[in-house]
Amino acid sequence: MAEAAATEVWFYHLERTGLEQALPELLEKTLQRGWKAVVRVRAPDRLQHLDGWLWTYRDESFLPHAPDDEPGAARQPILLTTGFENANGADALFLVDGAEPGELSGYARCVVLFDGADEAQLAVARAQWSAVKATGVSVSYWKQQARGWEKQA
């Protein structure tokens, strides 16, 4: 992981809900702050799945987003990508399914979401945690509890 002095890196350990519930809620909070977001995934099929899911996950909510290959996608508050560009000038980077962070400078926050029941995702998250800690970047670990997210480290 590249060093990014002003970037906070938050690890979210999913235990009680899946990505499909946690990601939209975190994206809503991001937009409420007036921030833009990039959601980086490893595979195009996952990107397509999340694109459809974010349109339909809750009737009373709207998350303006687009995959990065659509015309005008860079104008969207939420950009879905497999690439490393920050085409929409996002403040927050969300890493899903073990996606690599790449360069973090320019982001205020990087959020690493990983499934606690998936050994491969746990291994990737542990490696990413170690890499971030080694750079001296501000890092924290959040775990899902019965009453919500609790900071553990």
Image (cartoon, rainbow, N blue to C red):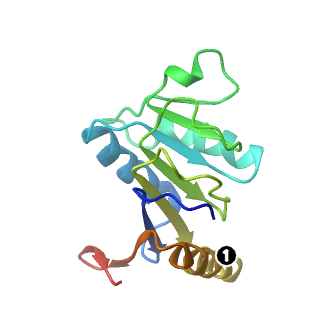
Q: Which is more toward the observer, 34 or 130?
A: 130
Q: Which is more toward the observer, 25 or 9?
A: 9
Q: Is residue 66 above or below residue 40?
A: above
Q: Quadrant of residue 98?
A: bottom right
Q: Is residue 83 left or right of residue 5?
A: right
- Find numbered disc 1 in the image and state the secondary structure of the residue it sits on: helix
Q: Quadrant of residue 114?
A: bottom right
Q: Is residue 152 left or right of residue 51?
A: left
Residue in the picture at 23% in, 76% down: 147
Residue 90 in the image: state x and y as whole percent: 46, 37
Number of numbered tags placed on the structure image:
1
Residue in the picture at 67% in, 59% down: 99
Residue 26 in the image: state x and y as whole percent: 37, 53
**Screen quadrant of the N terminus:** bottom right
**Screen quadrant of the C terminus:** bottom left
Mark 1 closeness class: few <14, some 14–19, many ≥20 residues within 10 Å: some
Q: Is residue 113 above or below residue 116?
A: above
- The residue under label 1 is 124
Q: Which is more toward the observer, 113 or 16?
A: 113
Residue in the picture at 45% in, 47% down: 107
Residue in the picture at 58% in, 16% down: 72
- Dot 1 amino acid type: Val
Residue 51 in the image: state x and y as whole percent: 59, 37
Q: Is residue 119 left or right of residue 139?
A: right
Q: Is residue 4 above or below residue 73?
A: below
Residue 54 in the image: state x and y as whole percent: 50, 40
